[in-house]
Amino acid sequence: MYDDAWYNYVPEHSNKKEYAPSRSSKHRRRESLLKQPNGNGQIQDLSEPILEALEDIPQNRGPPEATLVKRAKSYSDFYEVCTSYFTRTEGKPTIIDPSNILENSRQSPLLESRYEKYESEVLDASQDEYQLYRDQLDLSESHLDSLLDDTVEALDLLAKLSHSFKAVELQTTEFQAQCEDLLNEQKSLRNLANDVGNDLQFYAYLEPLTRRLNTATGSRLVRNDDFIDILLNLNTCIGFMDEHPIYRDSTVYKTRYSSLLERALTAAQTAVSTALRDVSIEVSKDLKSKEHNDTEEYIALYGKYESAHADLGRQLQALLTSNEFAFGQKGNELSQKPYTPQYHELFNQVVDAFIKSREPVNYVVSKNLVKFAAMELKEDADFKHFARHCVQYVFDICQNELKLIRKFFLDGPILKEYPDLSSWNTYGKYTEKLEENRMSYIKLLHSFLLPHLSNGDLHRICDLVNWLETTYLASAENDDDTSSTQEHITTAQRFLTDHLWQLSDDLFIRAAREIQYFKPSTEDLRLSARAEKDSVEITASRPPDKTIQLSLKTQEAQPMGGLSATTAFPTVKTAVTLLIMYNESIYDRPKKGDVLYEIVHQATDSLQRAATIIKRTSRIMDAHLFLIKNLMLIENLFMTHEIPDSIRQSAELDFTPIWETIRELQAQKQLFNPLAYIKPIMKGNLLPAVVDRVLDARKELEKVLVQQITAFTKHWRSRLADGNSKTSKAIAESAKELETLLDDVFQDETTKAALWKMIRSDESSYF
């Protein structure tokens, strides 16, 4: 209807007061949007509503956003605006209904005629409304300026507060550091106080314990339930004082604690020794008062001791079987404490008391061995059963002793291994002492059997040794690993190693040395093969108790290497028997070269002496054949029975340096000059040197055998040689004589063929 410029018309004015309408106009001005809903028409406090309105709107420091004024799109819209204006002027708001507007538009006169009537008033009202908005905008601008000023002041205040806070933060940091230092100092003081409190307990423990040990009933403290704790606390206190020598009176307290520990350990040692001594005295009286059977003896020797061990109490039992008191063990140097010698002194005394309390066992073993000999050893044939019975009885005793030792000291400090404690003036090998006491019954058995084994019959000791080796040592290779079997094996090994094997070697050497005293008869020097008696008696030019008798068994008289031992010289028979008996053992023990050397050496010397007699009484050829025959028998024995080498280590004096020095002086013509002997004496050239020599009896035997064979073959080679002076008849007679001689001396064809081969080695010399 109208141009767009009319609808968007806004009157220009430079001064708001120039166009301000009068307050007395009949039309009431439209309420301001900034007015409080319940106000009196005046703006009371515009700052708060404006701030509240701006709180949710993002801050924008630029001008407000430009907007287009909405224009009327139709007549109905313009009519609606006018109607609402007139309704508002009456002070009564009216809700416009579109249906009413359409009906009124039909009933009312034309809008143009009505608008013309009120055109001036509408313009005035619009001007007033626009002016009001401008005033409000100016007021808002002034409020915003004031807000900006307040904001700047607030920012300045905040900057000051920030600087103040930074200063406070710096002061707070310094204060915090000071507080942390104080807290650390407080913590260190608390720790120091705790340490002082902990250290003070090592000082405070002295007086109450001193009062307990100094009472009349202090010796009964070993039966209290806290006795082990007392010992451990004393150990701790002594160790603490030893580790802190700079503490006040630490040396004095260490000495006093050591004195208290000594008193406590003395009480323990007294209790154990008294219990063992009392039961030992009781058992000794009981055993000597009357005869007992095996069961009663076992109860007396072991049952009563086990009861005494139970009566010691749990505290003393723990002391003897606890690993806590094993101070100074081998490989654990940290366990060596200043109180270690006191404990080892206690262990020494306890072990000595235990060993002394076992003296009744020696009496019972000796009495029973004598009883066995009286009951079983009536004839020589009963010795085998008697010896085995004695050995089994003593082995059982050793096993029972081991069980009792374990009952008292198992897993305790006494059965541990310790290094050399001589620096502490004490002895740490308690296990060896107990084992030595246990093996003393083996020594007692050996002393009892020694007269029966040393009567000259080597078969006794050989049979006993073979039985022990077969029964115990050979069974050790089986799967039977029970404790009792292992204990018997250990005991048998100790019995053989310490006694029987050494005794056997001594008896064999003694029997071999008796060969040198043999005086051969005329029959013994004969070369012809003859049957010998079954026993050879070698009687020495000594008292009758030095006679060695060796009975040759049937298997020992079998031919060895083509030679028969029955036709040998008596000393060779003895040597062969000794070699076979010594070499044939069930258990492969190391053979001593001294024994083999002595047997072979004495046999060789006896043969050489006998050959010398034959040379004087008969032909030299008989002496050669005598030596060849007997030496070959011994040589073949080494190969057939695999006898080891007969070697002996011997130390001899060598006078060679003396003779060389004398020769040098003689060459220098200073032999009678005393001053010339000073330098050799200072160098030791005028003293004999000690030289270790290896003596081999088998090589000596082979050397003599080679010499005799060489002489024999050389003699017969010369007789059988085809010389000009010899006729064929003479050579044939010599060959026949040699054949007859070899047939008479050697029964086997192998030896004779070997000798013939050596004689005929040079074919040009033979027929």
Image (cartoon, rainbow, N blue to C red):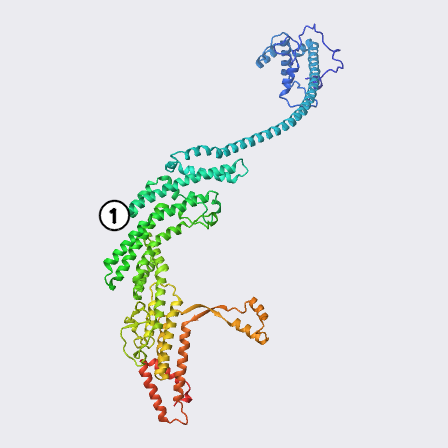
Residue 245 or residue 12, whichever sits in front: 245
Residue 315 or residue 360, whichever sits in front: 360
Residue carrying label 1:
289
Residue at (39% x, 42% y) in the render: 269
Question: What amino acid does circle 1 point to?
Answer: Ser
Q: Quadrant of residue 661?
A: bottom right
Q: Residues within 10 Å of mark 1 (few under 14, many from 20)?
A: few
170 relative to 533 in the view: left or right:
right
711 up-or-down from 32: above or below: below
697 up-or-down from 735: above or below: above
Residue 2 x, y percent position in the rendering:
69, 17
Q: Quadrant of the N terminus?
A: top right
Residue 108 x, y percent position in the rendering:
62, 9
Q: Quadrant of residue 373?
A: bottom left
Residue 455 x, y percent position in the rendering:
30, 65
Q: Is residue 635 visible?
A: no
447 up-or-down from 759: above or below: above
444 up-or-down from 540: above or below: above
724 relative to 681 in the view: left or right:
left
Q: Is residue 434 visible?
A: yes
Residue at (36% x, 92% y) in the render: 730
Residue 527 x, y percent position in the rendering:
32, 81
